[in-house]
Image (tube, rainbow, N blue to C red):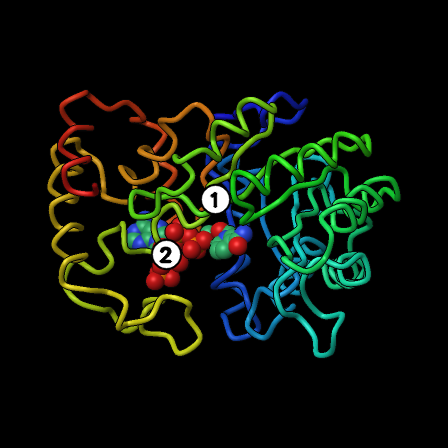
Amino acid sequence: MVYNRCGTSGIKLPAISLGLWHNFGGVDIFENCREMLRKAFDAGITHFDLANNYGPPPGSAEETFGKILKQDFVAYRDEMIISTKAGYYMWPGPYGEWGSRKNLISSLNQSLKRMQIEYVDIFYSHRPDPETPMEETMSALDHAVRQGKALYAGISNYSAAQAKKAITILNELGTSCLIHQPRYSMFERWVEGGLLDVLEKDGVGCIAFSPLAQGLLTNRYLKGIPEDSRAAKAHGFLKRESITDAQISKIQKLNAIAENRGQSLAQMALAWVLKDPRITSVLIGASSTAQLDDNLKTLQNLKFSADELKKIETIIA
Ligand code: NDP
């Protein structure tokens, strides 16, 4: 495994981290979840990313993770970076989502119970809240850190301007922002328009979520929609109808470049995100240990020639 420093902090994260948004819920097969976590940790993936609402049902990914942690990883807690988040809809009523201090603190308490742990390593504001003063949201993160229920604070889905403001407030509070978690892949490049510059300037790390565009940037959909894929599942966030012919054509062209590099498309897509030194880690999902194995081999070839980058650019621009 390659470990990259997270911004200018003392923490290093694995270049590949594992997220539990899909495939670790109550609807999924427990033994498969367990095998994936064991394989990941054995391969040096020390960072596991969760959120209050991951499942389905919401909360069940944290429960699954907590059970497996207890069974297999108790002795290794200090070798792991576990993150969770609050901000998206979790429970009914006015306090079950967004960025109030009430929601963030109570949600973190619930997450710790579900995972059966005393603290998380990173606690995120999952999304900016247009109605709550940012000072309140950031002070809740600061409070969680001061309480010892989180070691570091993070933000997710904040625009460049919102991130700048959040980072400044956290600095004033004395709890610096460790990391930002935005969506970033060959198919979703908004971070290149200013966010990465802000993070670099302020010494904040960046972990890119959905670097495989939920599986589109793999060999999964080259020949249609497999029945066991995210796009075929009723509860998946990738919708069948969102996979267009234009996208399939791009994926096929990218796959040809990957083949020439001697890589799978998934490996090339991850290497492409990791080529920017401002990216600390790619936060992948997986539904099998075979996918994990494939993705881990990314680290064998992270370099691109100028010609390859140019060809890729003409496809994804
Ligand atoms: P990816 O883009 O990595 O997509 C993962 C999916 O791609 C897998 O479930 C699998 O699909 C497919 N896949 C993975 N590897 C391979 C492979 N080698 N070959 C073929 N198919 C492959 O990431 P996710 O969208 O799952 O997001 C990753 C994590 O990011 C989440 O778990 C979560 O922690 C975080 N996240 C954060 C968000 C936020 O708002 N902060 C929002 C979304 C995600 P299949 O299941 O079909 O096999």
Q: CA distance from mark 1 to mark 2?
A: 11 Å
- Report whether residue 188 is seen: yes
- Residue 40: x, y in percent? 50, 44
| Quarter of the image where ligand 1 sits | bottom left
At 49% from the left and 37% from the top, the residue drawn is 43
Q: Does residue 224 appear to the left or right of 268 in the view shown?
A: left
Q: Is mark 2 within 8 Å of ligand 1?
A: yes
Residue 16 percent coordinates (x, y): 46, 37
From the viewer's perspective, is 170 left or right of 215?
right
Residue at the spot 47% in from the left edge and 26% down from the top edge: 278
Of 206 and 36, the residue lying toward us: 206
Residue type (three-letter) at the residue carrying disc 1? Leu
Please determine whether, in this image, residue 241 is positioned above or below residue 18. Answer: below
Which residue is label 2 attached to? 214
Q: Quadrant of residue 98?
A: bottom right
Label 1, on which residue?
Answer: 283
Q: Earlier in the sequence, mark 1 or mark 2?
A: 2
Residue 288 visible in the current orientation: no
* Quadrant of the drawing holding the C terminus: top left
Q: Residue at x 65, y 33 (%)?
A: 178
Residue 79 lies left or right of residue 44; in this view the side is right
Q: Residue 36 bears which disc, if any?
A: none
Where, by quadrant of the figure, is residue 310 drawn?
top left
Residue placed most toward the observer, 99 or 123: 99
Query: Which x, y percent locates residue 84?
Result: 66, 52
Q: Is label 1 in a helix, a strand or a loop?
A: strand
Find numbered disc 2 in the image and state the secondary structure of the residue it sits on.
Answer: helix
Front residue of this view, candidates 256 and 170: 170
Q: What residue appears at the point 58 percent right and 25 percent down from the top-left corner?
A: 7
Q: Is mark 1 within 8 Å of ligand 1?
A: yes
- Vertical comparison of 12 with 120: above or below: above
User: Disc 2 residue type?
Assistant: Gln
